[in-house]
Image: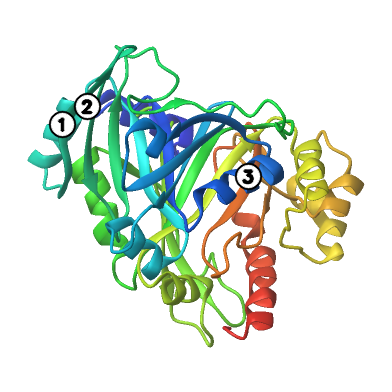
Amino acid sequence: MIATLEEKTEVIGKGDFMPLNGTDYLELYVGNAKQAAHFYKTAFGFQSLAYAGLETGIRDRESYVVVQDKIRLILTSPLRSGSEIGQHIDRHGDGVKVIALWVDDATYAYEAAMKRGAKSYMKPKIEEDSDGRVVRSGIYTYGETVHIFVERKDYHGIFLPGYKKWETPDYNPAPVGLKYVDHMVGNVELGKMDYWVDFYERVMGFVNILSFDDNDISTEYTALMSKVMSNGNGRIKFPINEPAEGKKKSQVDEYLEFYEGEGVQHIAVATDDIIQTVRNLKSRGVEFLRVPYTYYDAVTDRVGKIDEDIEPLRELGILVDRDDEGYLLQIFTKPIEPRPTMFFEIIQRKGANSFGKGNFKALFEAIEREQELRGTL
C-alpha cells in the first residue's frame, strides 16, 4: 500500500529534529525598493507594514516591508555603490535573497544545522528595542540564497528591531485574497538536485515527499527533473528543479543563464478563492501564462467532479489537477522582472497535497511559447 503525502508527513514529523513553525518573511534584493513596494501594493494587494533606512539610523540600505495575511515581503535596495546588496542585484537582477523561517529557538536551529554540515551566514544575534528582542541566525542554501531562523517569541513590535511602522493612509489598494506561502521552488545546476536534496535531509531534517523525472516533466523540446522536500509538519515545502537533456533549452536552463546561478524560481502563494483572486490580479495588470482553450475540454474527464464551473476557469486560464486527497487549482504569472527569472504561482488547494503533475505538459508548452518569443528556447 502506497502512503499518501499526508501519511508521509506525519511519519516525518515524529523524527523532526528542527521544528519550523512556518515562513516568517521573504527578503528580495531589488534595484528600487520604494518602487518595488508600490508595485507589490498596487498589483498584488500587499499592505504597508514597516520601513528601515536613513530615518531609522541605517546608512547602507533601505527596506520596505509589505504584508498580506501571513505573507511578509522585505524589499531591500542599497544606498551606496559597491555594496554586497548591489553586487547581488548586478549579478542576478531582482530576486529572493532570504527565505526566513520562524522557529522557537534560533540558536538551537543554527547549531543543529551547523553540526550537520551547514555553511554559516549569520551566527545567532540578539536584536533589541523597546518592544522586546528577536534572535536571528542564518545558513546558506543553493546559490547565494540564505535561510534565516527567526525567534520572535519575546518581541511585540511591528516587525523587527530597527524597523518603524510604515503608514500610507492615502494609498492602500485592497488585498486580493493571498493567504500564505504554500511552497517555494529553487532552480539548481545540472547534477546538483540530489546534492541539495541530501542537504535538506541531512542539515534540516526534511524528507523527499515527491519526485518527478524527465518522463513526468517534459514536452517535445524540453525537460526537467524535480524533487519536493518537506519539513516535519509540512508547513515548509521546497521543490528543487534541475534541467534534463532535451532538444532545446529548458526553462531551468534559461533561468540559470539569466539569473547567472542557482536561486528561487517561483513563490507559490495560497488563496481560498482563486477565481476572485485572479480576477483581481488581472484587473491590476498582472500577466499570466495561458494554456490553450482546448485544455478545458477534457478537464472533468481527467480530474472528475469539481465545485467550480469550467467556464470561469477557461476564461481566466486556471489549471486543475487531482491527487488521492483531493484537487487543486493553480495558475502562474509571467516573470515579474526584466530578466526571465522569478515568477509567482497562485494556488488553491481543495484537499490535494501535490503540485499539479497533470498540468505539467500544458504548462511547460505555455512556458516554451514565451521562451520562443524571447528568443531563448
Q: Secondary structure at mark 3?
A: helix
The disc, 3 or 2, on the residue closer to the chain's N-terminal end is: 3
Pointer 3 with pointer 2, Cβ within 8 A: no
| 30 or 249, nearer to the observer | 30
Residue depicted at x 38% and y 12%: 156
| Residue 95: image location, x then y, percent | 45, 57
Residue 53 relative to residue 376: left or right: left
Q: Quadrant of the N terminus?
A: top left
Residue 116 relative to residue 201: left or right: left
Q: For the view shown, which residue lies furthest in the right direction?
A: 311
| Residue 227: image location, x then y, percent | 40, 55
The Cα atoms of the two marked residues, 3 and 2, are separated by 32 Å
Q: Which residue is mark 2?
A: 106
The disc, 3 or 1, on the residue closer to the chain's N-terminal end is: 3
Q: Eyeballing the image, is 259 above or below 40?
A: below
Give neighbour class at mark 1: few <14, some 14-19, many 20+ (Cα, 10 Å).
many
The Cα atoms of the two marked residues, 3 and 1, are separated by 33 Å
Q: Amino acid at mark 2?
A: Ala
Q: Secondary structure at mark 2?
A: helix
Tag in front: 3 or 1: 3
Q: Which residue is mark 3?
A: 38
Q: Amino acid at mark 1?
A: Pro
Q: Which quarter of the figure has residue 294?
A: bottom right
Q: Amino acid at mark 3?
A: His
Q: Which quarter of the figure has residue 83?
A: bottom left
Residue depicted at x 24% and y 60%: 195
Q: Residue 33's mark?
A: none
Q: Which residue is mark 1?
A: 124
Pointer 2 with pointer 1, Cβ within 8 A: yes
Tag in front: 2 or 1: 1
